[in-house]
Amino acid sequence: MDTFADYILKEEELDAKMEIAYYLSKKTKVFFDKSVIFKTEIARLFLNYSKIQVDKNSVLTACLLCNCKKIDNAQDIEKIHSYAKEGAKYLREMGFDKRFCKICEEINRYSGSNPRERESDILELVDQFGGMLLDRPERIGFKPDEALVLLEHRNLKDEYNRYLNTFIEFVQFLEKIQMNDVVNMTALRRLVKIYNETEELTKFIQKVIYEFEPKIDKLIAEQNDEITEEMLSKIEGANRPLFSEETTKKIMAHIYDDPKIVTNK
């Protein structure tokens, strides 16, 4: 008999995964809110950008479930330090294998789990960076460039994350993409705006999947085409002859007609 783990992992469509996780949260009261969807979308974009050799299906599933035992109370330090480990234990009971649960446990570093899985480094970056973009009761959300500085020089100052530099490049790439609507703004700021303006979780999921994703994927494809064309143009420029064909003929004719020029025959 299939477990919940089998059921959600077999479903490869992200919108369907989100629906499964949503109904799990309604039934079991595990943590699942708009921030989970927000961070999962950043993870999807990062995986598409970086082409990192990991199981994308597992990473996105982990994004949806790794915070399952998180609580909203930021003052409960003990719970902040233990929720990832408790979540991993809960997911093990739901049928997920040891490695998947270890990936989820390592979304933060409080459990001391080592060596870290590659997928965990992705979860860590997305969770911390995504969280900094969103408003909290004690502060407003940071701008993407501010969040990157804090991520690199505060949160991960004394830690090694193998994908940090790639993630910084990804955010900088995304910040160059403008999304046109009533007001032009960068892709990440558009995603934050949708988050702030959509209260209901299910409506936010629909807006991300059916409105934001098609637009941003199209813009990224266009941007990549422009970059490819620019690179090809530089390569062609580097291989272009120094002189035109006509000039080359004149030079060669002059060389062979000039008796002072010694040629090898």
Image (spheres, rainbow, N blue to C red):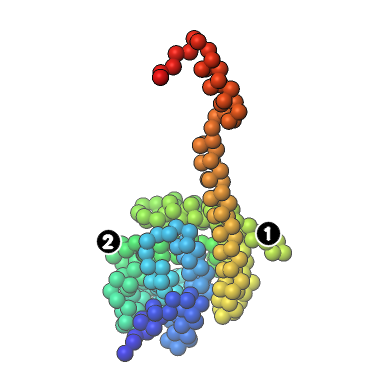
Looking at the image, the residue that sits furthest to the bottom is 1
Q: Earlier in the sequence, mark 1 or mark 2?
A: 2
Near-viewer residue (52 or 254): 254
Q: Quadrant of the C terminus?
A: top left
Q: Quadrant of the N terminus?
A: bottom left
Circle 1 or circle 2, nearest the eye:
1
On the question of residue 14 being in view, the answer is yes
The x, y position of residue 179, in whole percent, is 64, 61
Residue under the point 56% across and 46% down: 230
Residue under the point 50% across and 63% down: 45
How crowded pointer 2 is (Cα within 10 Å; few <14, some 14-19, many 20+) is rated as few
Name which residue type carries label 1. Asn
Q: Is residue 145 above or below residue 256?
A: below
The residue where tag 1 is placed is 184
Badge 2 marks a residue whose secondary structure is loop
Name which residue type carries label 2. Pro
Label of residue 248 in the image: none
Q: Is residue 145 above or below residue 100?
A: above
Residue under the point 56% across and 43% down: 233
Looking at the image, the residue that sits furthest to the top is 260
Residue 163 in the figure: left or right of residue 230: left
The x, y position of residue 142, in whole percent, is 56, 59
User: Residue 203's image quarter?
Assistant: bottom right
How crowded pointer 1 is (Cα within 10 Å; few <14, some 14-19, many 20+) is rated as few
Marks 1/2: CA distance? 43 Å
The residue where tag 2 is placed is 115
The x, y position of residue 22, in whole percent, is 48, 82
On the question of residue 146 being in view, the answer is no
